[in-house]
Amino acid sequence: MDLSDSPEDAEFRARLREWLGKVLPTLPPKPSPDDWPGRRAHDLGWQRTLYDAGYADVHWQASPAVRLIFLEETERAGAPYVGANFVGLLHAGPTIAAEGTPAQRARWLPPVLRGEEVWCQGFSEPDAGSDLAALRTRAWRDGDDYVVSGSKIWTSHAEVADWCELLVRTDPGAPKHRGITWLAMPMDAPGITVRPLRTLAGSAEFAEVFLDEVRVPVAHRVGEENDGWRVTMVTLSFERGTAFVGEVVACRRVLGELALEARRNGRWDDPALRRRLGALDAGFRALWRLTQWNVSEAEAAGGPPGIGGSVFKLRYSQARQELYDVAADVLGDDALDLDRPWVADRLSSLSYTIAAGTSQIQRNIVAERILGLPKGR
Amino acid sequence: MRFRLTDDQRALRDGVRGLLARRFDRTALRSAVDRPGRLDRTLWRELGAAGFFALRLPEADGGVGLGLPEAVLMFEEAGRALLPGPLVATHLAAGRVPGAADGETVVAAVDGGGLVEWLAEADVVCGDAEGARPLRSVDPLTPLHRVPDAAAAVDPVAVLLTAAEQLGTATRACELAVQHARAREQFGRPIGAFQAVKHLCAELLVRAEVARAAVYAAAVTAAPADIAAARLLADEAAVRGARDCLQVHGGMGFTWEADVHLLLKRAWVRGRRAGGGAAGEELLAAELLSGAAR
């Protein structure tokens, strides 16, 4: 058991840290959360900066350990989050890299890396959230096109996306996990309507997407027709792998800020509050170590972090919500003021036990695939 | 970074697991329950011969010359087998108390919190046990005395090895729960097929795996804050794990015949040792402030 960097990893860390120290002070300030075009420009600009410095493909090419160092150091330095590039870099990109043809890789991957195109995720539907395979959006062949009709929901970045990784049903007669196809849909195609959805946090984080006989070329299909479920599982293994690890570093920073705020406003003198902060610190320390363990195991096995990601996600989503509940106790009455720090974060943390597979779905995965308990409901 | 078991560490863990499976199986566990307060001296010497106590002593001093990570793996197995006896106290006394290293001498210690485990069976007691009064111990496999006005310093290694034992017990709780959930049928199917039971089992595993990462990392860094965090998570994994295991067992779990209560009671006893609970949380809180102020 060894927690120190290998010489190559230590060199990567030092080089990255030095570069971040130089480049971050030159970046423009973050736009407001409701300014979607501004956010798109900001996030794409950061991706372009990474590209020019040779760090654009760190999530795809590098070893898991290097990916971990990248997430740790960028978060510690306060670098911008992957933001609007999330789906392109962490879902669609890796999926196309793994399952796409040479022509598809050449068409779609470079613009993601260069920070030129934004992707969104067209998986969930009003009646197919946790039961993703129940999706009903239909696609049928008409010459060299698929014609797509239906609707998608909870689609992050839909308003500013150029492409959508879209799951459609191409064989309604087949069992529900078969008969699904993975398509790359251009978001400017006729027949697409995007309606922003306001979240409980007050912002428009995601949207409903209505599809009315949208034509998508057959050449935009990744994987075989009716084989989209398998392709999707490839996508989800990336999502649950390392997608959240930078956030643990961020949570530990918030915890330190909360301790300082509590000392400033006198609540530090309450032992019950201090103990909750200490207990949370224990939890985030452990989650960070669990990430290092998962990454070390994945590196030894030569694949992406697997279902161990479900163990991490279950505990992390819960810990993040507890963090902001403690923040509310540190703030007192100010916890009801949306202009105070951490209040908006508290609201958005409520999505963590739902998004990317609810806690209930993750527990089923842990119980059935790790512990080998029988399937059922 | 290679934060995983080396081949040698894996072999060590498997060796200890094998030894305990042979020498302290379920029959031995239950007969120990039937003879409360008595320590198996033959087994104690065998543990000594296997290096259980001398593991971290330098080879020049007749020890095995290994480190904290290896000690943690051994104590995890001891916790998994619910091995009774003042294991941590004797391990820490090796090299200082004659006979402790090879298991000839049984060493008890006064804990910072004022409790002593296995006082009557011990050959040597570390700390001032003056005025010790016996308790009717909740755990049939851990006789306890209370010492008035005890104020021993807290040894971080003792805190970590306690965490390792708790981790092993949490793992055992998960194994027992899953075994039962697969075998026990109600409403015509294994109860493990029902989500309510399945989710209890999943949480058992999640708590144990999170604790494992914390305990192993603390063994590598030996930093007091990492050790405090490891202990908090391992205590939680063991105590809540044993409770959930009992729940999965249903009415069976409330009987003396099922082993589940032995897991929970031992986890409670270890949870009272110094360095856990409020003390651990306060240590981490203080660390938070000094780290943030830097």
Image (cartoon, coloured by chain):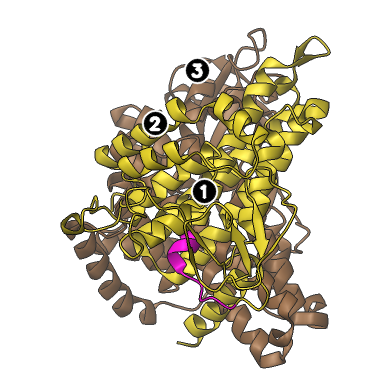
Chain colours: A brown, B yellow
Up the image or down, B208 lies above or below A253; here it is above
Residue nearer the viewer, A221 or A155: A155
Q: Nearer the viewer, mark 1 or mark 3?
A: 1
Amino acid under disc 3: Asp
Residue nearer the viewer, A81 or B141: B141
- The x, y position of residue A95, in whole percent, is 42, 34
- According to the picture, the residue beneath numbered tag 3 turns out to be A227
Which stretch is magenta? B151-160
Amino acid under disc 1: Glu
Say which quarter of the image contains residue A266. bottom right
- Mark closest to the chain's N terminus, 1 or 2: 2
**Disc number at residue A22?**
none
In contact (CB < 8 Å): disc 1 and disc 3? no
Q: Chain of mark 3?
A: A
**Disc number at residue B165?**
1
- The x, y position of residue B223, in whole percent, is 41, 69
Say which quarter of the image contains residue B49. top left
Say which element carries label 1. Answer: helix
Image side of residue B21 versus residue A104, left or right: right
Q: Circle 2: is it few (<14), some (14-19), or many (20+) Cα within 10 Å?
A: some
Residue A106 appears in the picture as rendered: no
- The x, y position of residue B18, in whole percent, is 39, 28
Say which element carries label 2. Answer: helix
Q: Is residue B157 magenta?
A: yes
- According to the picture, the residue beneath numbered tag 2 turns out to be B19
Image side of residue A105 versus residue B227, left or right: left
Residue nearer the viewer, B184 or B124: B124
Q: State the quadrant of the C terminus of chain A.
A: top right
Work out how far the residue at label 2 is from the one at label 3, CA to CA, in angstroms: 50 Å
Amino acid under disc 2: Leu
Q: Nearer the viewer, mark 1 or mark 2?
A: 2
Q: Circle 3: is it few (<14), some (14-19), or many (20+) Cα within 10 Å?
A: some
